[in-house]
Amino acid sequence: MKEIPKRLPSAIMDRVEAMLLSIVDMMIQLELEFPQKLDIDRLSRAIDLVLDAEPVLGCRWVPHWRKPRWERLDRNERQSFLSVNSQDAYERFKSESINLNVGPQIKACLWQSPDRDRLLLKVSHIPADAAAVKDIAGAISSIYTELAHDPKYQPEANLKGSRDIWQVLRYIPWQAYPKIYLNFLRETRMIGKARRGAYMLPFEDRARENLGFAYRFLPADRVAHLVDYGRSRDATLNDVMLAAYARALVLRGDLGGRSRIMVMNTVDLRQWYLPTKRAEGICTLSAGEYLNLGTDVGHDFAATLQRVCTITKRRKANWIGLSQLVGALPFYSMPQSLLEGSFRKATQRLIDKHNLIPGFTNMGQIDRDRVTFDEAPSTARLLTPPTYPPHFAAGISGYAGTLTITAGVYRSQRNVVEQFLDAMVAELPS
């Protein structure tokens, strides 16, 4: 294996994700359940080896006022695997943040209960987005399989694969950038309108204690019905879920009468702009899109869905996912201390003006073959990064035809979030 450098540069998207630490617990988790027993020794070895296969995972984050960097951990500093024997211990691990300044950037917990094995992969959201988490799971699964045939197997380190956003931007024709920047100016003006706030869930305080997760599970037959319902209306499943989210926000959110219905949702740029649909290395290649439904969500679900489709189709035809990213690149290039300080001030202004837009993230389908550990898991889901009140975000992920909605919740907001998710599911066509 080629020698891995002791220091690795941070990508611009690493620094953008680090900026969000003031409002989000920056971790993405993949939860898998297996009907069979996993090989603990082989699993532990596979997780350790992925820290070399994708070198950024075996690093700590080194803050710096101008440009942070990644620094490789010594062998005795990179404990990343934990085996527990109780649900309480497993849930405690799930609720713990991942310390990017200590590293490594991935942790794993295995709970072998009498009826099933549960494996939880916890990945720092600084070097990786949801698509990258699935890539990491695929790498661990591949290494786990190889170790069954060759206990001394060691994968090659991915030293050449780009982690930079330029692997996307190089495919954008230069003549498109003025239009993308104009879209950015229009969206920024729309978002910043102070005379109307945005619907927000009515959290009583901002306490960050007793973190847990709320789930809603949609079985395969229900998801198939939603897909057919959307297809008959020229809508995607993501459009259907966005419409349900927006309607639930009106039902359970602030009813001040002057609030706009807005949702910040994410776009995986790999799927739109990379010929291979895959990044070269473990990185973040996702960006934000804003759905603005104005002050009227529509008289019924079909009306809301039609409006959502109109907006998403227009954006898909007009460089979706790139407006805020390209427009803010000069801002993202400033020294890290100024970047983070400016973001905190801007966020506080939005909170003060009741204009903090809720988030929705579609983390995509989990490929059965990429999470197989000798056998495929019976269930799989991605857990949305928990957000600090008053901010809120929920997310969806799919596996084997099913769909799971998740949200991180703190004790002070659990009732509100549970009611919101109930309303969201109730809004979906049955």
Image (cartoon, grey):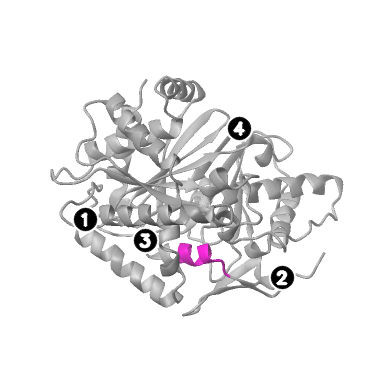
Q: Does label 3 or label 4 sit earlier along the sequence? A: 3
Question: CB under 8 Å between callouts 3 and 4?
Answer: no
Question: CB under 8 Å between callouts 3 and 1?
Answer: no
Q: Amino acid at mark 1?
A: Lys
Residue 12 is a magenta residue: yes
SS of the residue under disc 1: loop
Which of label 3 and label 4 is nearer to you?
3
Q: Amino acid at mark 2?
A: Arg
Which of label 3 and label 1 is nearer to you?
1
The N terminus: image quadrant: bottom right
SS of the residue under disc 4: loop
Which of label 2 and label 1 is nearer to you?
1
Q: Which residue is mark 4?
A: 378
SS of the residue under disc 2: helix
Is 344 on the left or on the right of 199, as rendered?
Answer: right
Q: In 3D space, how far apart are the residues under numbered discs 3 and 1 (Cα atoms)? A: 21 Å
Magenta region, residue range: 10-18
Q: How many marks?
A: 4
Q: Main secondary structure of the magenta part?
A: helix
Q: Amino acid at mark 4?
A: Ser
Which of label 4 and label 1 is nearer to you?
1
Q: In 3D space, how far apart are the residues under numbered discs 2 and 4 (Cα atoms)? A: 34 Å
- Mark identifier at residue 60: none
* Number of residues whose C-alpha sits closer than 10 Å to that of mark 3, classed few (under 14), some (14–19) or many (20 or more): some
Q: Which residue is mark 3?
A: 23
Q: Which residue is mark 2?
A: 75
Please, which residue is most extreme toward the left here? 257
